[in-house]
Image (spheres, rainbow, N blue to C red):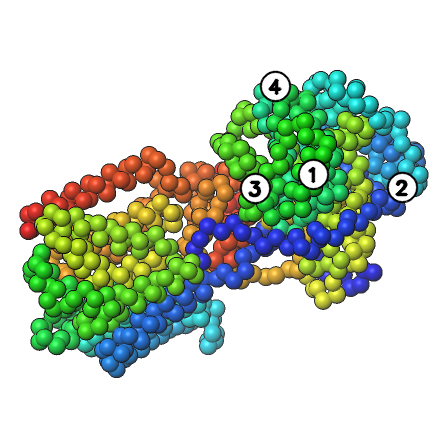
Amino acid sequence: MTNTMPKIVRKTSPYLRRPNANATRMMRDVTIALLPVSIFAIYSFGLSALWILLVSIGSMLLTEYVFYQIQDKLQGESFKFKNKNFTLYNFSAFTSGLIYGLTLPDQTPLWIVALSGVLGILLAKLIFGGMGQNIFNPAAVARVLVVVNFATLATYQTNIDGVAGATALSFTNQNLFSIEVLQHYTLTNLFTGIGIPGSLGETSALLLLLGGLYLALRTSFEVRIPLMYIGTVFVLAFAVAIQQGLGIWYPLYHIFSGGLMFGAIYMATDPVTSPITKPARVYYGFALGFITFIIRLFGALPEGVIFSILIMNMFVTSFDYHKVTHSQFSTKRNLIFASVVVLAIVVTLVGASYVG
Amino acid sequence: MIKKSRQVRDYKELTRALPTQTYLDPEKVFIHLQNGRCKTYDLYVEEGDHVYFGEVIGVRHGGFFEQPIHATISGTVGKIGKKLHRTGRKVKCVEIVNDYKDTYHPTITDRPDHVIDALTQDEMVEILKQNALVGLGGSGFPSYIKLATKETINHVVVNAVECEPYLSSDYRLILDRPEEVIMGLKYVMQALECNHGIIAIKSEKNPLYEVLTQVIERRYSHLNIEVIKLGNYYPQGWEIEVFKSALDIDIPYGELPMKYGVLGFNVSTTAGIYNAIKHNLPVVERYFTLTGDAINYPQNYRVRVGTSVQDLIRQSDGYKKEMNEVLVVMGGPMMGVSTVSDDVIVSKTTTSVIVLENIGYKEEPCVRCGSCVYSCPAHLEPVQIMTAVKRNDKDQMKSLHADRCIECGLCAYVCTSKIHVTDYVRKAKKLIR
């Protein structure tokens, strides 16, 4: 019969939650997906790669920890090792640090890694209010701080041919549409990442795709963004290839080299800094691809990925603006989007005909 | 996890295979004199009066309709007390003490089939009105107002989807009494001069499909009634979603389905229509699920309207010993209402009481994964509405159509960070009303 009566509490519906869903799992999955890439980086670049990764992750974790400790102190709370804002368990700072480390050139001095890491997470994440509040991707901001402030100090290893190159892409800047680039690196090398100079985690397209596949199977990222991103770069490069009479190697070269794969799969998909609806995420991926390609083709920098991500981060709020946002695709908006795509191809081709 | 997720674990295995327990002889029943739609009432009987089973003992006054109140057992009228209602307020209830004789009131007589065949729409509407038939799935909207529609109806849909987790009272009803459902549908089709009836079920509920198709084939093959299997997702049972999946008819927000030639009834309502027309019987009993992980023997009951839930919990051997804090939910676990006490009454529209262990979910910051946006059946953007509520930006709530929310609870269910998104959207609905 009625034994001890339990206490009846009142809540609001729904009373159930999806099992196994938490933000930590999402962040942890990104780390797991990046493991093969990190191991490959240490294998191909040696211990310096390991040091860079340790310093980049360490600087971000430590900054976040110290920041929250200071914040608590200012609010007059007593010191606790695990304070109430203790967010290190949820892998978000760890993931940012790992991604940041993997975008760095292998010869970057460690003090630059540490300084940019600290500034990156502080300026891009913590002062906005921490996890979920940031506008810019902290890893991308930290990486840009390195590019902008210490460009000459952060150098790439000279490769076997003795060509003091940056990434494989930097050849295209000097010689836009020449097949000569392939004399240095074959497409197979670019795809597997063997013998390719470049940033730690950006060399092997194969391993990056493998990680992407894992994330897609775990539904830990929005697969539309990288697909649109890489797809747009491919289509634009393909159009240029047809115009200039180049082979299929040209678009392939573009998508396999540089940080495109890495940026598309691991940085552009950061849910905090990407739009919220399905259509907006497709448009976002397209815009990223377009800006990247424009920077690669016409800009002074060989790499457009990080900058395009930061530029588009700024527009995320416009995608999500309440008067324009729609959670569903519609024929009208699809048509508008299709015409924007066509326009983008035309602009690229007109530009390419001047450069070429 | 960023994905469209409408799979909600359904926990129906707790109750649906078990036979329905009959509990038709409560010591006393409590009849609601007021409810969510009706605030005032007139009572025709006094304390000490004897009433018959099915007798009209009063009338509830709603905004645009009146509802007779029926006694659901025969016995002596007791005190008028206050009991907790689903709406969270205490409402007046009249007590009837059972004399265990079940003496029928003379109005309860069977109608011969040839009389029923000659009934017109208006006559049927009048019968349902006399018997105070309302939407028994939980809405409580008067069914006779629905049935009185002057629009041409091409399809009548019986909604037997029951997509809320835990609930299986409709499931048991169809298994136990398929004919009542089909006959009820037949009467509705007759009233509306419609020749296409649909019984919509979830595709995983194969036993229901077998029962219904067998009965239709053997006895009602002359009627154009189809049993349609719909998707196994939540909220497939939302009327708009049923019409969309079963008939491919898209009903825009704010429009009535009748305008599009379809009319939907809950399956218990259909059975109620059968009883009202065939036996001239008001809703005196219903199928009721008492389940949840905090109760010893979850099962389905056939109970009198007005039975105390405390009695039923005792019948189910009470709460589990190890429970410290429980939630008592009237309705389903996704949309139901949590009450502060188990001293509640099974009313006409109470489909179930679910007793759940209280789990304190830890909310994390929103990572803008977008699962709520992907999953929302009304195509809203719950997370954006949530930020609008936090900023108290009413323009934004309006242009994000917060008022279209059906409060199905899916956004909070799927949330990666376990944030109670539904609550924010609910708040937004209130703010812009």
Tags 2 and 4 on a common chain:
yes
User: Mark 2 and mark 4: span between their CA atoms?
Assistant: 43 Å
Q: Earlier in the sequence, mark 4 or mark 3?
A: 4
- Residue at numbered disc 3: B230
Name which quarter of the figure residue A145 lies in. Answer: bottom left
Q: Earlier in the sequence, mark 1 or mark 2?
A: 2
Name the residue rendered at 33%, 34% in the picture. Answer: A332
Q: Residues within 10 Å of mark 2 (few under 14, many from 20)?
A: many
Q: Specify whether B398 is left or right of B310.
A: left
Tags 1 and 2 on a common chain:
yes
- Residue at numbered disc 1: B214
Q: Earlier in the sequence, mark 2 or mark 4?
A: 2
* Residue A121 appearing in the image: no
| Chain that bears disc 4 | B
- Residue at numbered disc 4: B150
Q: Residues within 10 Å of mark 4 (few under 14, many from 20)?
A: few
| Chain that bears disc 2 | B
| Chain that bears disc 3 | B
Residue B27 horizontal/vertical position (percent): 88, 46
Kind of residue indicated by mark 1: Gln
- Residue at numbered disc 2: B97
Residue B430 horizontal/vertical position (percent): 54, 40
> Mark 2: which secondary structure?
strand
